[in-house]
Image (cartoon, rainbow, N blue to C red):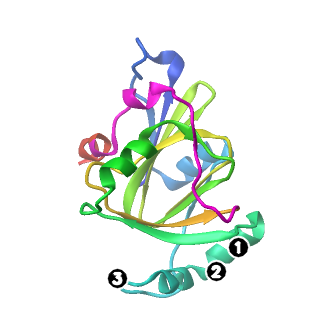
Amino acid sequence: MSLLTVYNLADGIDGQPRQGERYTDFNAIHEQLDAISVQFERWTANNEFAADADQETILAAYADAIARLTEQYGFQSIDVINVTPDHPEKTALRQKFLAEHVHDDFEVRFFIEGCGLFYLHVADKIYAVLCEQGDLISVPANTTHWFDMGENPHFKTIRLFTTPYGWVATFTGNPLAETFPTLDQTVAELS
């Protein structure tokens, strides 16, 4: 289930966020994120493909949606990333993504399978977006954010970049991310 939780930092106590306002309806999530210029969509494949399909097959299955976004934003680099619990660098990757950062480029992810939790720090609010299979999120350039893939990550995403060199981050040094629920805590709470 896709989920958006909006935390108002002004309501926190001693740097700890209070309970945020939750949205599970796709249209409500879309509306809240659209208000901060974050694109949130649901995609379906043009055709079925095997779970172990290669990058070319996966990109072909979503060619129409990719072409539409590429025309709109001028993406130059598109790839598929697959991170599983046995990934040898999962701990280092998670720590890097958990640190609050910005990009000069969009951060666009389409979840083919699995899930991940994006935190967007906009003004005095934090938007926690739990993305699942079928969700596309496009975080605008220079939007402060972080991403939690969990202790035992399981996700496969299509990544789209307007630059040929891919993911490049500028870290803020703000420890705020440490005060929010992790992906694992959020998923456990929903169970």
Q: What residue is shown at x 38% (from left), y 43% (from top)?
A: 95
Q: Position of residue 50 (x, y in %)?
A: 36, 86
Q: CA distance from mark 1 to mark 2?
A: 6 Å
Camera-nearest residue between 178 and 126: 178
**Segment colored magenta:** 163-184
**Which residue bears the numbered disc 3?**
52
**Which residue bears the numbered disc 1?**
68
Residue 183 shown in magenta = yes
Q: Answer whether residue 113 is visible to the viewer in this image.
A: no
Q: What residue is shown at x 69% (from left), y 61% (from top)?
A: 163
Mark 1 or mark 3: name the one nearer the start of the chain.
Answer: 3
Q: Position of residue 186 (x, y in %)?
A: 32, 42
Q: Amino acid at mark 1?
A: Arg
Residue 7 shown in magenta = no
Q: Image height check: is 140 above or below 176?
A: below
Residue 98 circle label: none
Q: Image height check: is 5 above or below 39?
A: above
Q: CA distance from mark 1 to mark 3?
A: 25 Å
Q: Nearer the viewer, mark 1 or mark 3?
A: 3
**Which residue bears the numbered disc 2?**
64
